[in-house]
Amino acid sequence: MANEVHETEEMKGAAMGFVEEVWNGRHYELIEQKIDEGYAGHWFAVGEDGPVDRDGLREFVTAVHRGFPDFHMDVEFVLAEGDMVAVGYTSGGTHQGEFMGIPPTGEYGEATGVFVNRFEEGRVVESWASWDALGLFQDVGVIPEAFGLTNLLGTGLSMARRNVTERARKRRAR
């Protein structure tokens, strides 16, 4: 029992350390130490069709820092069970560089989120993450404040319908 408690505390410390050292401290070289070579990240990343690998995680972290040079993440809670640790956070920064193809707006934005890491032998082997991208993009002025879920779904469906219609038109033209 004492060993399980010790391992749980180590995993929680590792998750919080990643936030402080990599997200806030920008020590990218620590990614290779803390994240397993076979890492699989299941989280939103533009252009990704499957799990993100360790290099993809590094690319995403550096892209966030390029887009938001003053980016900072604050841990709100940490929960652990078995081989998994969940971290709830609030993050924010000023949109001063391109991020996800969006030119800088100069506005400050915040996002809340949660990530869950699964550990093996003290290293993260898999993670899941969810964050309020809509709120962030509203904060930095890319999406209007009044643009709610209904508008988002309607826009998404319209774009999908246009895409399908265009593909069908091209096939018929062949």
Image: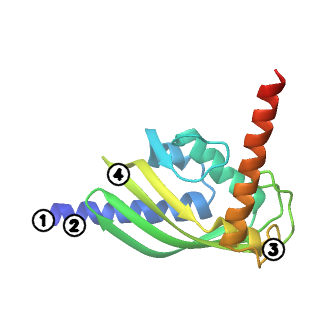
Q: Secondary structure at mark 4?
A: strand
Residue 154 appears in the figure? yes
Judged by depth in the image, the label closer to the viewer, 4 or 2, is: 4
Q: Position of residue 85 (x, y in %)?
A: 37, 62
Measured in 3D between alpha carbons, the distance from the residue under mark 3 to the one under mark 1, in whole angstroms, is: 52 Å
Earlier in the chain: of badge 4 and badge 3, it is: 4
Q: Are marks 1 and 2 in contact (CB under 8 Å)?
A: yes
Q: Quadrant of the C terminus?
A: top right
Measured in 3D between alpha carbons, the distance from the residue under mark 1 to the one under mark 2, in whole angstroms, is: 6 Å
Judged by depth in the image, the label closer to the viewer, 4 or 1, is: 4
Q: Residue at x 77, y 58 (%)?
A: 67
Disc assigned to residue 45: none
Q: Type of residue at label 3?
A: Pro
Q: Report which quarter residue 163 is drawn in.
A: top right
Q: Residues within 10 Å of mark 2 (few under 14, many from 20)?
A: few
Disc assigned to residue 1: 1
Earlier in the chain: of badge 4 and badge 2, it is: 2
Residue linked to disc 2:
5
Judged by depth in the image, the label closer to the viewer, 4 or 3, is: 3
Q: Secondary structure at mark 2?
A: helix
Side (left or right) of 119 relative to 44:
left
Measured in 3D between alpha carbons, the distance from the residue under mark 2 to the one under mark 3, in whole angstroms, is: 46 Å
Judged by depth in the image, the label closer to the viewer, 3 or 1, is: 3
Residue linked to disc 4:
119
Measured in 3D between alpha carbons, the distance from the residue under mark 4 to the one under mark 3, in whole angstroms, is: 39 Å
Measured in 3D between alpha carbons, the distance from the residue under mark 4 to the one under mark 2, in whole angstroms, is: 15 Å
Residue linked to disc 3:
144
Q: Quadrant of the N terminus?
A: bottom left
Q: Type of residue at label 1?
A: Met
Earlier in the chain: of badge 3 and badge 1, it is: 1
